[in-house]
Image (cartoon, rainbow, N blue to C red):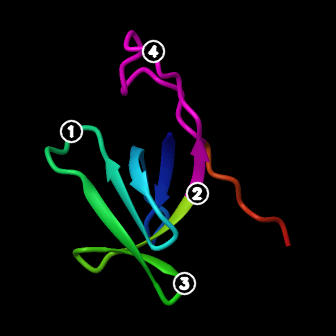
């Protein structure tokens, strides 16, 4: 499953969800050797480094081995309209 992470300041990165539960998620990112883990702390997703992120989108992805991570469609963030 593709996931879109939004960092403070608006920077966005996409990744693939490796595992998830109600309190933690593990994500692999392009060009990073290690997976990242985020835990839900007081309603916010927090990285081991202390960085806080928002989850902008999650989308199912093609599971065929012929689709590379870099080539797969990426989710787009949706902003709430007040």
Whether 31 is drawn above or below 24: the answer is above
Residues at marks 3 and 4 touching, judged by CB atoms closer than 8 Å: no
- Magenta region's main secondary structure? loop
Q: Which residue is mark 3?
A: 43
Q: Residue pushed farthest front?
A: 21
**Residue bounds of the magenta highlight:** 56-75
First of labels 2, 4 by sequence position: 2
Q: Which residue is mark 4?
A: 64
First of labels 3, 4 by sequence position: 3
Instruction: Tell me the distance, in whole angstroms, between the alpha carbons under discs 1 and 2.
Output: 20 Å
Q: Which residue is mark 1?
A: 31
Q: Secondary structure at mark 2?
A: strand
Q: Secondary structure at mark 3?
A: loop
Rendered location of residue 47, percent (x, y): 31, 72
Instruction: Tell me the distance, in whole angstroms, between the alpha carbons under discs 4 and 1.
Output: 21 Å
Q: Which residue is mark 2?
A: 56
60 in the magenta segment:
yes
Q: Secondary structure at mark 4?
A: loop
Q: Residue pushed farthest top?
A: 66
């Amino acid at each position: 499953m593709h996931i879109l992470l939004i960092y403070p300041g608006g920077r966005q990165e996409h990744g693939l969800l490796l595992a998830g539960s109600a309190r933690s998620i593990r994500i692999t990112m392009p060009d990073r050797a290690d997976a990242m883990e985020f835990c839900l702390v007081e309603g916010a997703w927090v990285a081991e480094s202390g960085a806080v992120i928002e989850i902008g989108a999650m989308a199912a992805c093609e599971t065929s081995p012929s689709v590379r991570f870099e080539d797969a469609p990426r989710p787009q963030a949706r902003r709430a309209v007040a």
